[in-house]
Image: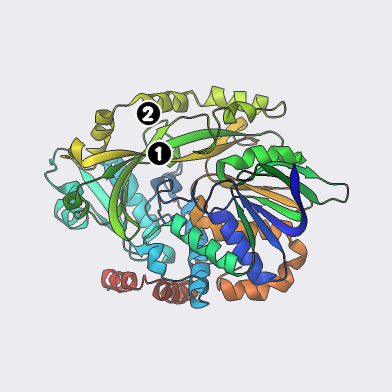
């Protein structure tokens, strides 16, 4: 039984950080647009954006070793790190704009300054880390990064990790003070509260079941009103599918050619959470290590200080797991029903290529708590099992597609936008660095889907994001100026004074 049929300019599917960002940007650029949001859960930011489902690293490539690679000639390729850093800075500039406009309040509710570190053990890994440090330290984006293999210095940086550690294996770390911890769930909540105040029609407990193109070229979205057990039909000129792991199924329903030959592989995560306040107080950083052979990049081990609901927490992980669900609140049939005639060979190709990943995931799924404690003890040598609890994190769906470099069924690590040729529908797929690069990704969506408006919108975009269209690496003075202003607005300015100490 249908009780509602509407026409609108824009439909956003999913109330996570991506839809929050796109909706907010569009309302600033085109306030006259009618925008509707549909979310199957009762609140915004409860799936991938939720604080417990997201590592909360303000991904600026300051500590993630998998964003830098050693080339065959021995030199270090930091181009991916540079790109991700610039993308995160676009997000920070946009949040700063919203705070200045009183569209976001109390930035410390969602972003806190926190040192980012990379830690490795063993001579070969230390050589890699030092080479990475030397390549990054001379880049203006990574100004203030330090390297040390001196145990006494490392005790200052990460006392909990160095406490009672034997000297049998060499250890080294890099540290940079301009890192952040971001609560994307809290940020998403704030942005949707603001969007509600701006007149967006936000519908919770509404599940999108189908998307079909109409004869006039618009899109009809079939929505199930879960609470009232009614079907609704809404049409829009533009639909954005930002439903986390649920995006792939909805993208397939559109029938656009660009959705062909794309599959998804779900990876779940588990974190260890410290319940001992004395242990929590001994650590103040995000410390990333190296991923084990065969592990997906989202499983890079890290020991993280987090700020959750005003409380300081300490998490370690993530341990990968496997569930056929594409969302934590998804169905056990998600993986099976995502396999279609057009992506079957792509999925088979991925299965053949990723035997080591499959083996790794099986080992992770059956790992006992004590086995996980053994991995934690590589970071905290004398960690006690009773001080740590297990928390299930979010589901991520890694994109699988055919590529020239990787061939049939290549597993993609990252965030991808898939859009129709006419720009009337776009979907976000993939995982990390995801949330941290939301503003950059949504600007990409606008460029693909509203190319006819980008010229008239450019002045406003530059007002919101001062470095839009410019390279911060190539404009170090602009980078310094913008960074200082953004840090001040977001309450991160104490980071700058620490950086000055480092560089003086």
Using residue 271 as the reference point, say whether residue 435 is left or right of it. Answer: right
Asked if residue 68 is positioned above or below residue 482 in the image, the reply reads above
Tell me the crowding category of disc 1: few under 14, some 14 to 19, or many 20 or more residues within 10 angstroms, Cα based. many
x and y, in percent, of residue 399 in the image: 58, 38
The residue sitting at 52% across, 44% down in the picture is: 431
In contact (CB < 8 Å): disc 2 and disc 1:
yes
Tell me the crowding category of disc 2: few under 14, some 14 to 19, or many 20 or more residues within 10 angstroms, Cα based. some
The residue sitting at 20% across, 42% down in the picture is: 380
x and y, in percent, of residue 26 in the image: 66, 65
Using residue 463 as the reference point, say whether residue 174 is left or right of it. Answer: left
The answer for how far apart the CA atoms under marks 2 and 1 are is 10 Å
Kind of element beneath mark 1: helix
Using residue 210 as the reference point, say whether residue 337 is left or right of it. Answer: left
Residue 421 visible to an observer of this rendering: no
Quadrant that contains the C terminus: bottom left
Closer to the camera in the image, 483 or 224: 224
Kind of element beneath mark 2: helix
Using residue 353 as the reference point, say whether residue 304 is left or right of it. Answer: left
Nearer to us: label 2 or label 1: 2
x and y, in percent, of residue 270 in the image: 37, 37
Quadrant that contains the N terminus: top right
Give the quarter of the image for residue 300: top left
Residue 173 visible to an observer of this rendering: yes
Give the quarter of the image for residue 335: top right
Asked if residue 354 is positioned above or below residue 412 in the image, the reply reads above
Label tally: 2
Q: Earlier in the sequence, mark 2 or mark 1?
A: 1
x and y, in percent, of residue 273 in the image: 29, 44
Q: Which mark is residue 299?
A: 1
The residue sitting at 45% across, 73% down in the picture is: 486
Pointer 2: what residue? 364
């Amino acid at each position: 039984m249908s009780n509602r049929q509407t026409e609108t300019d824009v439909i956003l599917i999913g109330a996570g950080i991506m839809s929050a960002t796109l909706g907010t940007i569009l309302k600033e650029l085109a306030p006259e647009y009618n925008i509707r949001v549909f979310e199957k859960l009762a609140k915004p930011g409860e799936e991938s954006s939720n604080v417990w489902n997201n590592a909360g690293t303000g991904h600026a490539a300051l500590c993630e070793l998998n964003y830098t690679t050693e080339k065959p000639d021995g030199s270090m390729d930091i181009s991916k790190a540079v790109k991700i850093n610039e993308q995160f800075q676009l997000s920070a500039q946009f949040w700063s704009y919203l705070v200045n406009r009183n569209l976001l309040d109390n930035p410390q509710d969602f972003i806190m300054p926190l040192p980012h570190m990379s830690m490795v053990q063993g001579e070969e890994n230390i050589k890699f880390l030092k080479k990475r440090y030397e390549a990054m330290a001379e880049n203006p984006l990574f100004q203030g990064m330090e390297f040390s293999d001196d145990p006494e210095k490392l005790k200052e940086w990460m006392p909990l990790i160095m406490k009672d550690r034997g000297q049998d294996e060499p250890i080294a770390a890099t540290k940079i003070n301009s890192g952040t911890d971001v609560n994307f769930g809290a940020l998403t909540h704030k942005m949707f509260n603001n969007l509600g105040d701006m007149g967006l029609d936000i519908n919770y407990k509404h599940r999108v079941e189908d998307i079909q193109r109409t004869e006039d070229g618009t899109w009809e979205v079939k929505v199930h009103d879960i609470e009232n057990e009614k079907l609704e039909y809404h049409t829009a000129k533009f639909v954005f599918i930002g439903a986390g792991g649920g995006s792939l199924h909805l993208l397939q329903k559109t029938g656009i050619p660009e959705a062909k030959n794309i599959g998804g592989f779900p990876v779940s995560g588990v974190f260890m959470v410290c319940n001992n306040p004395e242990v929590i107080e001994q650590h103040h950083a995000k410390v990333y290590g190296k991923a084990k052979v065969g592990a997906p990049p989202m499983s890079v081990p890290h020991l993280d200080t987090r700020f959750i609901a005003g409380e300081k927490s300490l998490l370690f992980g993530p341990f990968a797991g496997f569930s056929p669900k594409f969302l934590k609140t998804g169905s056990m049939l998600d993986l099976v029903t995502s396999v279609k005639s057009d992506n079957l060979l792509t999925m088979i190709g991925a299965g053949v290529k990723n035997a080591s990943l499959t083996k790794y995931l099986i080992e992770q799924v059956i790992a006992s708590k004590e086995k996980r404690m053994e991995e934690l003890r590589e970071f905290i040598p004398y960690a006690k099992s009773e001080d740590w609890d297990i928390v299930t994190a979010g589901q991520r769906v890694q994109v699988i597609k055919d590529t020239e470099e990787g061939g049939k069924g290549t597993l993609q690590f990252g965030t991808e936008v898939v859009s129709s040729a006419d720009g009337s529908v776009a979907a976000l797929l993939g995982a990390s660095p995801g949330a941290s690069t939301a503003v950059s990704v949504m600007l990409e969506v606008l460029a693909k889907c509203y190319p006819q408006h980008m010229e008239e919108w450019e002045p406003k975009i530059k007002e919101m994001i001062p470095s839009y269209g410019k390279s911060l690496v190539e404009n170090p003075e602009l980078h310094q100026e913008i960074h200082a202003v953004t840090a001040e607005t977001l309450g991160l300015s104490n980071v700058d004074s620490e950086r000055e100490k480092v560089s003086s």
